Amino acid sequence: MEASWQADRTLLRQRYHENPHRRIRDFAELLKRSVGWVAKWLKRISAAPHDETVLNGQSRQRHHRRRG
């Protein structure tokens, strides 16, 4: 599953660099992803346009211990 997500993120990055003025909805339809998913990844891609590691998924695990 992660490979499929990685491929979608890579394709989104390529298409975004080809036509950065395209609507988020157009990218979502192209990739068959939600508008929210596309917006989240475009924000990350825009923050580091030449960094390949930005395409890696981020862990959902807690990064800090719970105080108890």
Image: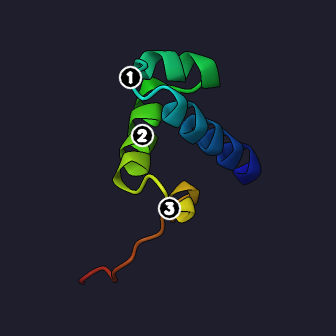
Identify the image quadrant of the C terminus.
bottom left
Q: Nearer the viewer, residue 2 or 20?
A: 20
Q: Are marks 3 and 2 in contact (CB under 8 Å)?
A: no
- Three-letter code, disc 2: Leu
* Residue at disc 3, secondary structure: loop
Using the image, tell me which numbered label, if any, was put on residue 12. Answer: none
* Residue at mark 2 to residue at mark 1: CA–CA distance: 12 Å
At x 45%, y 43%, the residue is: 41
- Quarter residue 52 falls in: bottom right
Q: x, y percentage for residue 14?
A: 59, 38
* Residue at mark 1 to residue at mark 3: CA–CA distance: 20 Å
Of pointers 3 and 2, the one earlier in the residue sequence: 2
Using the image, tell me which numbered label, if any, was put on residue 21. Answer: 1
Choose mark 3 or mark 2, whichever is in front. Answer: 3
* Residue at disc 2, secondary structure: helix
* Residue at mark 3 to residue at mark 2: CA–CA distance: 13 Å
Q: Identify whether 19 is placed above or below 42.
A: above
Q: Which residue is mark 3?
A: 51
